[in-house]
Amino acid sequence: MILSALNDLLYGFSVALQPANLVWCFTGVLIGNLVGVLPGMGVMAAISILLPLTFSMPPVAALLMLSGIYYGSQYGGAICSILLNLPCHPPHAVTCLDGYPLAKQGKGGVALGITMLSSFAGASFGIIEMIFFAPALVTVALHFGAAEICSLMVLGLLVGSTLAKGSPLKGISMTLLGLLLGLVGTDINTGIGRFTFGIHELLDGIEIVAVALGMFGIAEFLKSVNNVRPIDTSHTHIKLRDMCPSRSELKQAAMPMFRGTIIGALCALIPGTGPTIASFVSYATEKKLSKTPERFGHGAIEGVACPEASTHSSVQGDFIPTMSLGIPGDAVMALLLGALIIQGITPGPALMSAHPDLFWGLIASFWIGNIMLMVLNVPLIGIWVKLLAVPYRILYPSALFFICIGVYSSTNSITPVILTLAIGIFGYLLLRLGFHPAPILLGFVLGPRFEDEFRRAMILSRGDVMVFAEKPISAAILCLTAILIGYQIYAAFRNRQAVGGKMEELDNSLTVEE
Amino acid sequence: MRMLFLILIAAMSLAGAGALRAEDYPAKPVTLIVPFTPGGPADSAGRIIARALEHQSGRPFIVENIGGAGSTIGVTRAANATPDGYSLLLASSSALVMAPHLYANLRYDPFTSLLPIGQITEAPFIVLVNSASKFRSYADLLDYGKANPGKMNFATPGLGTVQHVTVELMMDVGGFSATHVPFKGAAPTVTALLGGEVDFIVETLNSADALVAAGKLRPLAMTGIKRLTQMPDVPTFQELGQKDVEMRSWFALIAPKGVSAPIMARLEAMLNAALTSEDTRKAFRAAGFEPVPMPPAEVSTMIRREHEKFGTIIRAKNIKLGHAPVSPESTMLAGLMGENSVR
């Protein structure tokens, strides 16, 4: 099986390396990269603008280019998150947490270097996953029904609760606020709009872009506008050497990168769990596993490496259910399939055998595209970092302008723009009060998914809660959750004892001294 | 991007051209509003017909996706557009037939704010089960459903979708019952069927074809009048003796009310020419659609007929969508309590 896959892959390279396809692939990743850098400009908008162009292209070229836009934008998306705290795409919101502090410390170049490395590692793994395991993984993925995904969301929320820094109470209240924001929109079981205030556009809920950009980008912008200070430009003259992470930084990033990759690959398989959830979960896992969790949020290199690796591995893995079943995993995938359908190619299980040039050519082009992106971005890091040297009064207003255009393009309507600004102002108030926005996004991403799946599981089991324990996958996930909680309590208990012991020692030493 | 730029220049230079005569139509790019997010069948159909109309008129037809709220947001936008023939709409039964029954406060009326130009495509729904299912025929499913009321599960893309109402109609006519499991969108319902989580779904040919051909799903019956050429072995409900189970998913080209008669006539001619051209027919078929032209008057009657038929089912099942009912005098607070006030 492995041999035949390698054979097919070689064939794929022969398709993807044809000069015309190579050029289209490059065009795609270049456009994607640029779109990714522009705050708020979504992949969806970019692909749908370019879709008519592809009608007159051969199907392979069209697919290579459009996919290139998708994964290319993920590379670009990290740049603004790290340098400006603007998560142009929701998955990169997590990268802001440590990337922006790193940039403020003048290590933006290093952070970007690590990002590129992690992205490439994650993407490569995702591609390997697609080549060798696609059929097997699809079978596994179909076993993830409502109960299983619901249990997984519980685990995600638990692991993610460590995202907060500072007061745990504030962290929990922010997660709950995120859950509440996630409630906005039509309740799928009763059809009633919740918290919509008679606004039609809210019937589908709040756009995640609005929450991510508002809470991070605009809130941060409002916060810093109060204390405009000349941004330290001494670090913007970056030589290639400065971008290269040092050996110790690489060592720090290696394991998180690897774990992030695995988490991303797993998330890609579970229907509807895209890169956003993957990046949150991997960040939280890393923080949990770290011996020095207090460094997270203040510029930990691991905090940049793991979410980026998992985002990219998940982005590539997303193609697995889409290409092997013809069922789109998310909106972008639906758009790519739409492009194929207009070309007269019916996506489905037979795609691999009926159009091997398309399937294997696409996979081979992933690799080529990712290498192109590396080559494209590494020399550009120096230029990106120079962005920070642009005077504040020009840089931020123009970023704000792009945010508005980008958010508008997501639905072609003004409501999300107003929402983004309103959420931004609210986020600013929260920042001033010492609440951190990351848990809001976590609650917002996982909450609605949890609710939908929980209620669906309840309908399917006719209201029997035991279904979560009866299904093996779900039971295993819940067991893991219980173990984690148990460990947490044990650790807290042991800490208290240790602290208590130390106090005693201290008391003793004090008495001795007396 | 370059094209967009050119279009922009063209639009600006023509904006000042003054009053446009019908024989010059279209003198500038035409916007076709597709009231769904990009990707998915409506978007595909919209882009194919836009391209065909572009060939007919020699002017760009630009697809603008305005999704949301069961396609009512995009339709509202189209209904309120200047009726000069430069803003058109690709509509389906979601907005024109179902929404008026489902939403309390629509800002358009399917009969008075919009005018059909013609139908574009139509497709029957196919009853699908997993190929591992014990149901070999629709009779099997029916018998099981009658013997075990409410025990089967069916998935739909959401409450009040055509798929949902189709299954309700099937259950009414067949005299059986099953449990509704609503999802968000059509794709996850197919996944749920493949994973064996639900027992059956109804979908159109374009989402089912490849999976049926691959032997993953089994078609049991279809809601058209005639059998499908692509699936000649699948019986119609007519043949099964349940004549009332007749349902179609369709797309039509619609204009806001007030477009002048000559422009409407020109559009109708362009649409007909497009739908009879071999290239366009081939493009539609390859994407899993059947192009079926229908003159505007007939489309109006068809919408009215479906409006009544679906209305009966929706009222009987008490399906509602939209905001929680709020009395005009109670404002924000009532909105906050909205969810409770409904229950």
Image (spheres, coloured by chain):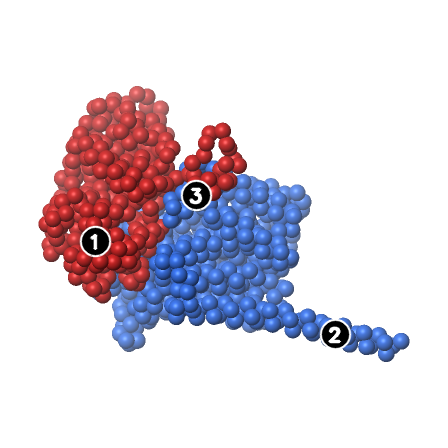
Chain colours: A blue, B red
Residue A502's tag is 2
Q: In the image, is residue A97 above or below residue B247?
A: below
* Residue B69 in view: yes
Q: Nearer the viewer, residue A273 or B335?
A: B335
- Say if mark 1 contacts mark 3, CB within 8 Å: no
Q: Nearer the viewer, residue A424 or A184?
A: A184
Which residue: 16% across, 53% down?
B221
Chain letter behind tag 2: A
Along the polypeptide, which appears first: circle 1 or circle 3?
Answer: 1
Which quadrant holds residue A20?
bottom left
The lab-note entry on whether marks 1 and 3 share a chain reads: yes
Q: In the image, is residue A428 above or below residue A454?
A: above
Which residue: 28% across, 27% down?
B112
Give the structural element (helix, strand or loop) at label 3.
loop
Q: Amino acid at mark 3?
A: Arg
* Residue A254 in view: no
Per the image, the residue denoted by label 3 is: B343
Per the image, the residue denoted by label 1 is: B127
Q: Position of residue A172 (x, y in %)?
A: 58, 56
Give the structural element (helix, strand or loop) at label 1.
strand
Query: Does A398 sit left or right of A337 as displayed?
Result: right
Chain letter behind tag 3: B
Which label sits in the foreground, 3 or 2? 3
Q: Position of residue B266 (x, y in %)?
A: 20, 28
Which residue: 30% across, 28% down?
B113
